Image: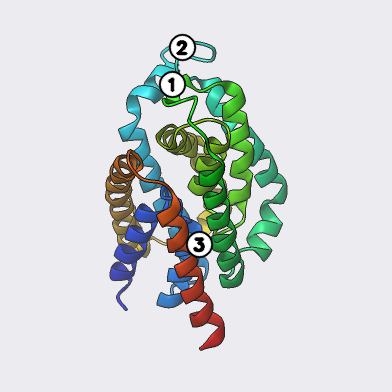
Amino acid sequence: MNENIIAVIIGIVEGLTEFLPISSTGHMILVGSLLGFEGEKASVFEVFIQLGAILSVLILYRDKFIAMVRPGTINIYGGGLTAMHVLAGIIPVMGVGFLLHKPIKTYLFSSHTVIIGLVAGAILMLIAEKAAGRPTTRNVDSMTIKQAFWVGLFQILALWPGFSRSGSTIAGGLFFGLSRKAAAEFSFIIAVPLMLVACIYDLMKIWGQLNMDDITLFAVGFVVAFVTAYISIVWFLRFLNNSTLASFAYYRFIVAGISYYYFFLR
């Protein structure tokens, strides 16, 4: 298959799944295996196009990011969502991710671990929906730093591919009084610094593998991931106004079942 077509397909997969609670990493591993797009270049490509997804969040929530980081001052303790909330939400997973980065990359990036993560994450989401009472925090700007920290702890689960960063954080938010929309928006916002650091870290380690001949491939994937992620986020927030996470959990069970059959039974 032509590599530019592969770039479009994987860019769409990245954009659609990065911020939905269905695991972008899991889908990228599974789709990459199906397309035969694996190896060093595929790893660099998949890291790079995440920057397109990050850009979509920066544009959608530019007012909140500008409010947090103004010229000459950083909003740490002011009203609304602050830099302290973001720090509380990302420090737990950054610490664990830094310490366990090598074993995670070595042992957890495979089809069977993704299938386990898809199922476990789906169960967590269903439990969170069942356990969640009436939300005490309906708007992301009303979150407490304590809530942000607890959501950040749940995000550690997403270090297991297939678990889903979005699914873990939204489920954590439901357990601690956030509405689905508030939990989702906080998940999107804390994804920016977290994914940016992770992408830069990975790209620095594999920068020497980049080839000028691959510029078109990377550009296509980046643009497609950006556009698709933007549309995906807007749709998802509207969906959460009247719906639960249950449909995403059932979808994960289906994907896990199909993947298990394809990779291990046929």
Secondary structure found at label 1: helix
| Camera sees residue 199 | no
Secondary structure found at label 2: loop
| Residue at 56 percent of width and 83 percent of height | 264
Category of crowding for the residue at label 1, using alpha-carbon neighbours closer than 10 angstroms: few (below 14), some (14–19), many (at least 20): some
- Amino acid at pointer 2: Gly
Q: Give the alpha-carbon distance from disc 3 to disc 1, as whole Å.
A: 31 Å
Q: Are marks 2 and 1 in contact (CB under 8 Å)?
A: yes
Work out whether mark 3 precedes mark 1 in sequence or the reverse, and give the earlier one. 3
| Residue at 54 percent of width and 59 percent of height | 162
| Residue at 29 percent of width and 55 percent of height | 224
Q: Which mark is residue 141?
A: 1
| Residue at 43 percent of width and 31 percent of height | 182
In the depicted structure, whether residue 110 falls above or below residue 193: below
- Amino acid at pointer 1: Asp
Q: Which mark is residue 79?
A: 2
Give the percent coordinates (x, y) of residue 43.
50, 62
Nearer to the camera, 155 or 127: 127
Q: Which mark is residue 26?
A: 3
Give the percent coordinates (x, y) of residue 175.
57, 37
Work out whether mark 2 precedes mark 3 in sequence or the reverse, and give the earlier one. 3
Give the percent coordinates (x, y) of residue 21.
45, 51
Nearer to the camera, 188 or 206: 188
